[in-house]
Amino acid sequence: MIKPGRLKIELPKDVKHILDTLTENGYEAYAVGGCIRDSILKRSPDDWDITTNALPEQVKELFKRTVDTGIKHGTVTVMLDKKSYEVTTYRIDGEYEDGRHPKSVEFSSDLVEDLKRRDFTINAMAYNEKDGLRDEFGGIGDIRKGMIRCVGSPEERFNEDALRMMRAIRFSAQLGFSVHRETMDAIRKLAPNIKKISMERVQAELIKTLLSDKPETVELFVECGILDQILPHVASVLKSPKKTIVLKMLHNAEKTPVMRYAALLYYAGPDAARETLRTLKLDNYTTEMVEKLIRQEAIPIKVNEIDVRQAMHDLGVDFIPMLRDFKRNIYKSKEEVMFIPMGKYLVQIETVYKMYQQIVERGDCVSLKDLAVNGKDLIELGMKPGEEIGNMLNLLLRVVIEKPIENDRQVLLALVEGKLADEKK
């Protein structure tokens, strides 16, 4: 059993410097939150947050370089070399009117008052070398149990900030923990409140869940009713008989937003996928690639080099490996879930991919930029700039896609001359 007071956490040099500076000047100071949780779990913290009873103005007096990042809420960013550390005064949050932000903030001199406003017990622990671990709400016990549990009343925490409902499930996915029954019951009850949260914030929690080692945990968003409120296409898929295949695809997919979202939305179809990702305000690249993968998956590339080169031209050279990985995931996942042999489909996509690799290695021309002639060459033959040249270049590209050996400047110029001569007759 881990005993809080005896637990030793190795603090980074900069964090120790900030804590020592504050304590040497008569203030309390602790590293707090996710960095303590991750340190206990032997994970590398993304950042280190510090909490103190010093007021923002007092913090600013002690450090040479600071930034007023959230000073009205008690947060000052201390800059040490090129790294930044948020130092926040103990605080008590006022009433939450919008399901996201407190109407007011009151500074406090009591660490426990600050910790009790935090979301989950595993995120409500503080540490310094003098006092050791301050664990007022059973965070160590919940880590030992592998449990996500709210600090105090789950309904109060979720009414304060509705995004915490998604954070509970996201932490479950990232840490492999289960969500405490009372916490999960409160999420089910308050799921409609998620509509108060911006889609950018929703997407941030959703993608962290999808990129975790357990992306299949996304089904909890449906089980508790959250996605019914905001992403009906995803909810529909994960309530359908296809759910098991989708969850397997998510588990098998490469850890990239494109591949995980493509797996999640595969059975929704390309149009619904685009609508969903637009709703989430996702970036254009991810949205377009996901829609393209889902749309193109149903269109087979024939097993011959001409069709493979044409696909490379139409879809993009870099897209073919993505399409291969996506198709392979679909077939393998179906095979694992349905026990239906998919060998012939896997052989087909691997054969096409091998042809693709050979084409890339040879350097076959599949785009206008790789054509041995350009518009300037055609102008020198007497062609007028504009649509006529564009049409001729595309005609030459079709020729070399069928016969790569024809991508020779003299050969192509001779073809153009012959074509122009025929048109004059």
Image (cartoon, rainbow, N blue to C red):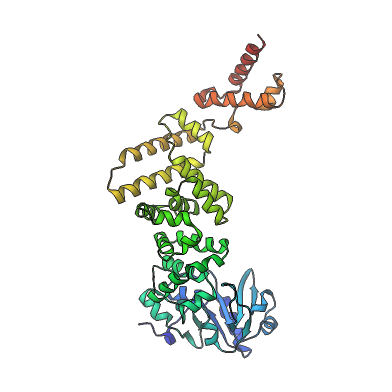
Total marks in image: 0
Query: For this rendering, which residue is in front, 74 or 274?
Result: 274
Quarter of the figure that contains the C terminus:
top right
Against 310, residue 126 (above or below) is below
Examine the image and state in which quarter residue 5 appears.
Answer: bottom left
Residue at horizontal 47 percent and vertical 71 percent from the top: 190
Residue at horizontal 53 percent and vertical 60 percent from the top: 203
- Which x, y percent locates residue 80? 64, 73
Against 29, residue 205 (above or below) is above
Residue lying at the far top in this picture: please name it. Answer: 425
Residue at horizontal 53 percent and vertical 53 percent from the top: 277
- Which x, y percent locates residue 247? 38, 56
Query: For this rendering, which residue is in front, 400 or 326?
Result: 326
Examine the image and state in which quarter residue 29 appears.
Answer: bottom right
- Which x, y percent locates residue 289? 52, 46
Query: For this rendering, which residue is in front, 380 or 384?
Result: 384
Query: For this rendering, which residue is in front, 416 or 248?
Result: 248
Question: Does the image show residue 211?
Answer: no
Residue lying at the far bottom in this picture: please name it. Answer: 26
Quarter of the figure that contains the N terminus:
bottom left
Horizontal side of 262 relative to 373 (left or right) equals left
Question: Does the image show residue 220?
Answer: yes
- Which x, y percent locates residue 269? 46, 46
Against 101, residue 385 (above or below) is above
Horizontal side of 251 relative to 85 (left or right) equals left
